Amino acid sequence: MEHAIAHQHPHRDDEASKMGMWLFLFTELLLFGGLFLVFSVYRYMNHEAFTKGGAELDVILGTVNTIVLITSSMTIAVSIAALQHNKVKLSIWLMVITIVLAGVFMVNKYFEWTTKIHHGLAPGTEGFSQLPPGEALFFLLYFFMTGLHAIHVIAGSIFIGIVIPKVKKGNVSHDNYSLLENAGLYWHLVDIIWIFLFPLFYLVH
């Protein structure tokens, strides 16, 4: 009886952990869903200004970042599958690759942001105050929403980074992988949010 109970507790903890993560992800979706709604309303009210603002963004760089994030979602998913099959080294390497891809995304975003700042399109710059109200609103939403997404990218990378040593030590393993699974769920959220952000801002017309 004691042996059976000992195996039930981790299972219940895993289920509670997964449920907690899903609830957290739901609140994140509500947050970004609200922002997407706000963007859509203002876009309808300032169609020409938003179209002009979207033309200032680098579609190629945005496309590259989209591919990078989709690839990173694949690597973290395969990492979970690898750990489930007790392929620890492969799982760790795939997590490392996921973090590297996150770094590539952030570097690209850094260069994109600095270009916009240099051109006076960022809130707080001298040129920003001279923009027409509609364009100023577009770039305000652009920096806020992509900046908020970037924070999630950093948080997701840290989450995965925390899991790696636990996998090395065997605390997260093929029969106890819920923490890695939760990290994967969070990372998929990061990817999904960007898949919505990309067409909203870069493909505005």
Image (cartoon, rainbow, N blue to C red):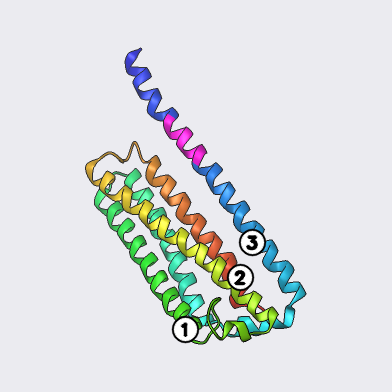
Residue 10 in view here: yes
Residue 26 in percent (x, y) is at: 58, 47
Crowding at dot 2, Cα within 10 Å, few <14 / some 14-19 / many 20+, comes out as: some
Q: Amino acid at mark 3?
A: Leu
Q: Secondary structure at mark 2?
A: helix
Read off the magenta span: 13-20
Distance (Cα) linking label 3 and label 2: 9 Å
Position of 95 relative to 181 (above/below): below
- The residue shown at (54%, 71%) is 143
- Residue 50 visible? The answer is no
Task: Count neighbours of disc 3 (C-alpha within 10 A) and say few if under 14, some if 14 to 19, many if 20 or more.
Answer: some
Q: Position of residue 145 (x, y in %)?
A: 56, 66
**Taking 11 as reference, is 83 above or below it?**
below
Q: Which residue is mark 1?
A: 115
Q: Position of residue 27 (x, y in %)?
A: 58, 48
Quarter occupied by residue 84: top left
In magenta stretch: residue 18 = yes
Identify which residue is drawn at 51% across, 82% down: 116
User: Between 139 and 91, which is closer to the camera in this rendering?
Assistant: 139
Q: Is residue 55 left or right of residue 82?
A: right
Q: In this figure, which residue is indicated by the disc labeled 2?
A: 141
Q: Which mark is residue 35?
A: 3
Q: Quadrant of the C terminus?
A: bottom right
Using the rendered view, name the quadrant where residue 34 is placed: bottom right
Helix, strand or loop: magenta stretch: helix
Q: Are marks 3 and 2 in contact (CB under 8 Å)?
A: yes
Question: Answer yes or no: do the residues labelled 3 and 1 have beta carbons within 8 Å?
Answer: no
What x and y, as percent, mark residue 173? 30, 40
* 126 versus 95 height, above or below: below
Chain-order first, disc 1 or disc 2: 1
Q: CA distance from mark 3 to mark 1?
A: 24 Å
